[in-house]
Amino acid sequence: MKFSILVSEGPYTHQSSDTAYQFAKAVLAKGHEIFRIFYYHDGVNNATRLTTPPQDDRNIVNRWSKLAEENNLDLVVCVAAAQRRGIVDDGEMKRNGKDATNLAPGFRISGLGQLIEAGIQSDRLVVFGD
Amino acid sequence: MMVNRKAPYGTIYAWEALEVVLIAAAFEQDVSLAFLDDGVYQLKKGHQTKGIEVKAFEKTWGALEDYDVTKLYVAQESLAERGLTADDLAVPVEVLSRADIGKLMEEQDVLLSF
């Protein structure tokens, strides 16, 4: 089965990011396909590589990057939500005159159309939010 | 179907849900909206947000028709629990029981909840 996942809450504040990650791992372990993981609302904070949790805690951002690299996943951050919350890649830095970037490896910034497309292309779009 | 469950202000969910509605409509999807729980407050007439310095989006509901988004379902129980009726809402809606909205949900290809 082809899944897509929507992550709507920020890491550490809310369980959603953890549950979505565990779900994604389980989906892949069962041999299913993940078409896309889309990050919206505070979920875009899953994509900042500047996260530095205590050493004895899980690193939610790095975990996503690793999962994406190992499984060739498409992790997409909503551009409008990212702009509000200061998630920046090279293109956004130049476009908006910012002096830094913070997008973690394996993520890309794109539009909400990517979420709509995920809904169309996938057998299941599973929402992890509040 | 977009499921709106949160009050219009206080959190960003309602506003960003509306952005998804407009993009989905632009992609010519068959978009409907369900309003449950505090989500019914999103449709209430007379938003005045100047004091909290956030944009009011009450007027957007009237504009949805231009995007061919006309299916607005509101949970009757959620209105009643809050002392509201359809007359208190900014745009015409279809008031349905929670159970009937549940049946509609079963017919959807994609459900997004906010």
Image: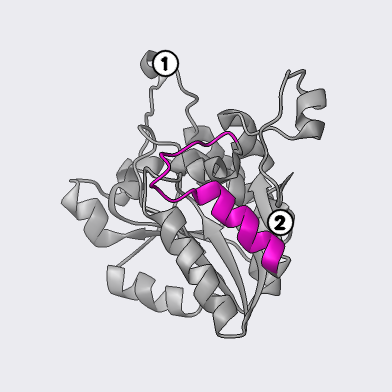
- Name the residue tied to disc 1: B50
> Which region of the structure is painted magenta?
A50-70
- Which residue is nearer to you in this view: B103 or B17? B17
Task: Tell me the subunit letter for badge 1.
Answer: B
For label 1, the SS is helix
Q: Residues within 10 Å of mark 1 (few under 14, many from 20)?
A: few
* Eye-nearest disc, 1 or 2: 2
User: Front-most of A27 and B44?
Assistant: A27
Q: From this view, report whether residue B31 is shown above or below residue A9.
A: below
Instruction: Indicate the position of residue B2 as horizontal and vertical percent values.
Output: 50, 59
- Is A19 drawn above or below residue A1 in the view shown? above
Identify the image quadrant of the N terminus of chain A: bottom right
| Residue pictured at 45% horizontal, 42% vertical | B14
Q: Is residue A37 magenta?
A: no
Residue A63 visible from this viewpoint: yes
| Residue designated by label 2 | A114
Q: Is residue B68 something that shows in the picture?
A: no
Q: Residue at x 38, y 33 (%)?
A: B9
Tell me which chain the residue with mark 2 is part of: A
Residue A109 at x, y percent in the picture:
72, 44
Residue B1, placed above or below residue A82: below
Is disc 2 on the same chain as disc 1?
no
The x, y position of residue B13, in whole percent, is: 45, 43
Tag count? 2
Q: Which residue shows up at 50% across the image and 39% down it?
A: B15
